[in-house]
Image (cartoon, rainbow, N blue to C red):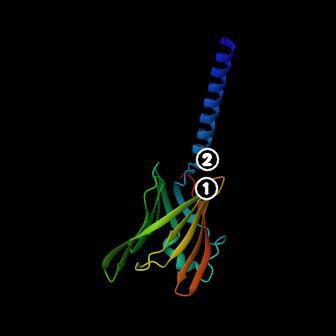
Amino acid sequence: MKIIMKYISSTVIIMAAFVFFINYNLYAQSKPVNFSGQWHLNESKSDFGRLTAASAKNVQILTISQTADEIDIKSGDSTAATIAMLRLNGKSSQLVSHAVVNEIATVSKSELTTQWINDHAVIVTLDHPKGTMPPAIKTYTISQDLQTFIIDYKLKYGESELTGKLIYDKQPGN
């Protein structure tokens, strides 16, 4: 009887350790890497599609900050800026756009749908038919060495579709 009890308790301990290890690995694999830093557009590596590099003036520099619950991607200047807030805690993600037109400041907010592909990439969908932004699908990816940030985008303007790829290099010290 003692041998059976010893065998059962050893088996239970081994199974508990195994379950803990599996859960720990699943959590560790699903946790996104740190996207934080200042990122500069590498025009020579980017593919602007039908757009020009000049049309990307408000996305030349991205500032990304990350907490346990959110990744914020900021771009633009005092005349036009956007903040994409990608929520990691299951809450709704959001895009906030600020613009100054004829000295009048405007703010628009759109809901985003986020779907994590893996710990280095997320697909973000904006489909706001009454919003100021066209429907868009963007895939944000950070390289394995954490030095390159890539935005693959597809924007719909009526029947037309614009696609491209913006490639950013992480700035030293960030």
In the image shown, does 171 or 75 lie closer to the viewer?
75
Percent x, y of residue 146:
62, 53
Percent x, y of residue 70:
46, 54
Percent x, y of residue 18:
65, 33
Chain-order first, disc 2 or disc 1 = 2
Q: At 52% from the left edge and 54% from the top edge, which residue is drawn?
A: 36
- Residue 94 - label: none
Q: At 43% from the left edge and 68% from the top edge, which residue is drawn?
A: 111
The vertical placement of 101 against 3, above or below, is below
Q: Which residue is mark 1?
A: 120
Q: Mark 2 belongs to which amino acid?
A: Gln
User: How many numbered dots are placed on residues in this image?
Assistant: 2
Q: Which residue is mark 2?
A: 29
In the image shown, does 29 or 68 lie closer to the viewer?
29
Q: Residue furthest front?
A: 1
The vertical placement of 173 against 79, above or below, is above
Q: Helix, strand or loop at disc 1?
A: loop
Q: Quadrant of residue 160?
A: bottom right
Whole-number angstrom distance, CA of label 2 to CA of label 1: 10 Å
